[in-house]
Image: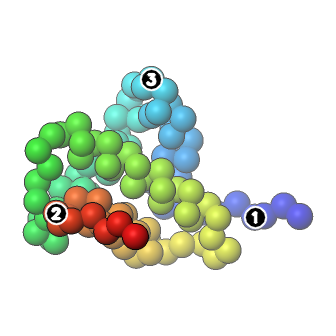
Amino acid sequence: MKRPALNYPAPIYNLIHVTSSLWAGQPNNQIAEVLTSYMDRAWQVIREHLLPIPASLDRLELTVKLAAEAEMLFFNAAINEPTREEIELFFADFLCRSLQQGPAIVQ
C-alpha cells in the first residue's frame, strides 16, 4: 500500500531533496539557501529560549543539520501531515535539548 505524499512546508520539502547533498558536502545555491533559513531559525530559537551561544559556529551548524534531518525523518514517518506549528516546535525542542547546558543524564 503506497502512502500518499505529504505536502511539507517549503523549507522541509526542500530539505528532503537536498539532505544527501548536505551530508556529501556538495554545496550549491539551493542547499545554502535551505541551510541559511534553518540557521536563521536556530538563532531565533536561541534568543527566544535564552540558550547559551555555542562556542563554535561549526557545532551550531552541525546541530542545525541534525535537527533538520531528524525533523525530516520524524515527519516523513508521521501518519498525518504535520502543521507548520508542529514542525517549528519539533525544531525548537531539538535545538533546546541539544544546546542547553547541564549534566548529561546517564542511566
Where's residue 105, x and y in %? 31, 68
Q: Badge 3: few (under 14), some or many (20 or more) residues near its Cα, within 10 Å?
A: few
Q: Mark on residue 96? A: none
CA separation in Å, label 2 and label 1? 40 Å
The tally of labels here is 3
Q: Secondary structure at mark 2?
A: loop
Q: Residue tagged by mark 2?
A: 101
Residue 102 as seen in the image, left or right of residue 98? left
Work out whether mark 3 precedes mark 1 in sequence or the reverse, and give the earlier one. Answer: 1
**Residue 3 visible in the shown view:** yes
Front-lying residue, 28 or 23: 23
Q: Residue tagged by mark 3?
A: 26
Q: Badge 2: few (under 14), some or many (20 or more) residues near its Cα, within 10 Å?
A: few
Quadrant of the image for the N terminus? bottom right
The residue depicted at 63 percent of the width and 70 percent of the height is 78
Given the image, on which type of amino acid does mark 1 rest?
Pro
